[in-house]
Amino acid sequence: MTIFSRLLLCLLLISTNVFSQKEKSSFQVVPLGIKGGIDEKNLSAYLIAPSNTKDFICLDAGTVNAGIEKAIENKVFKVSTSEVLRKYIKGYLISHAHLDHVSGLIINSPADSSKTVYATEKCMEMMENHYFNDQTWANFGDKGVGFPLKKYHFQTLNLGEETPISNTKMTVKAFPLSHVNPFESTAFLIKFDDSYALYLGDTGPDSVEKSDKLKNLWTAVAPLVQNKKLKGIFIEVSFPNEQPDQFLFGHLTPNHLMTELHILEELAGKGSLNNFKIIVTHLKPPTKNIAKLKEQIKNQNDLGLKIIYPEQGKKFEL
């Protein structure tokens, strides 16, 4: 081999190594449900785990069983539905207690294994008082009314406090969101090693909710955006722009999404969101509204965002 050939080979190896490091993912995501609204087989629930592990936490749990079955159909998992439910899902992070975010957890609880359910104090109180209360459903928790069966450990999250997620190498920090003020939802900042993912439950824009909760959240995560540590943001966009503000009911439109993300960019620095991953969640049927919403986001994306529309049962990386 000539000296030139050796140099060329070295350059190729170096560039390949740099590219692979640059593209290396930190998290794997398996959507079990992606919609808001009436499709009970496809409601908000996202499995997230460090790449190359099976230690998933479920972000909300509107749909569980049907989503696992879809993932198995897509060959994401090569084991039974029961094994994914009982062994791969290590716990649940519940953003708020509306049924489209918790019904899968409730219905599947008799078949589930012992694990932890994490939520803020207000959300946990609603779960205990209205669902796992020995009236609407058996109390599978370890506290609350009725007779606790102690299958689930109900762990209350303190806002702004980093909490280890049991049986994983991840931690979570909870931030309050406004979802038809004064009702609260939650954002979860997931950490693994030096990488982060941000999941927002249902939220209205600050301007409509008369709140500063999103502004405070953007302020908290802006340094992570600057330092390229935040790998992506899961954020809901429920309606197209034609939906009047008075009928948003604590949700976002493309207009409000872009307004909020411009605030984040101002805090993180100009150009900081170029090619940044935004995972759009909670799209509400009918199909024509979803198509219109996607077109509006595409046309309004002046920040260079990489928009991801998750599909039920199809894995992607962050």
Image (cartoon, rainbow, N blue to C red):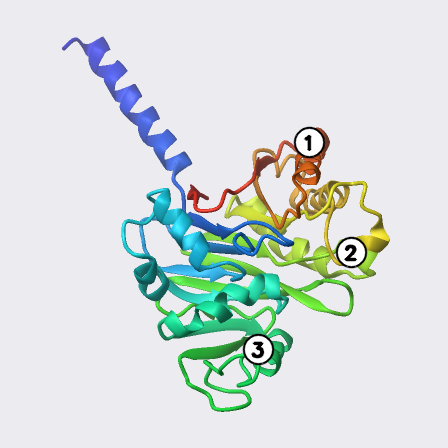
Mark 1 closeness class: few <14, some 14–19, many ≥20 residues within 10 Å? few
Left or right of 138? Residue 51 is left
Please report whichever mark, 2 or 1, sits nearer to the chain's N-terminal start: 2
Question: Residue at left 56%, top 55%?
Answer: 43
Residue where numbered disc 2 is placed: 206
Q: Which image quarter: residue 193?
A: bottom left
Compared to residue 1, the image places residue 255 above or below, namely: below
Give SS at disc 3: helix
Q: Is residue 168 visible?
A: no
Question: Residue at left 49%, top 83%?
Answer: 139
Residue positioned most to the left: 1
Residue where numbered disc 1 is placed: 295
Give SS at disc 2: helix
Compared to residue 226, the image places residue 81 above or below, namely: below
Please, what is the three-letter code of the amino acid marked with disc 2?
Asp
Mark 2 closeness class: few <14, some 14–19, many ≥20 residues within 10 Å? some
Nearest to the observer: residue 137 or residue 23: 137
Please, what is the three-letter code of the amino acid marked with disc 3?
Tyr
Please report whichever mark, 2 or 3, sits nearer to the chain's N-terminal start: 3
Marker disc for residue 131: 3
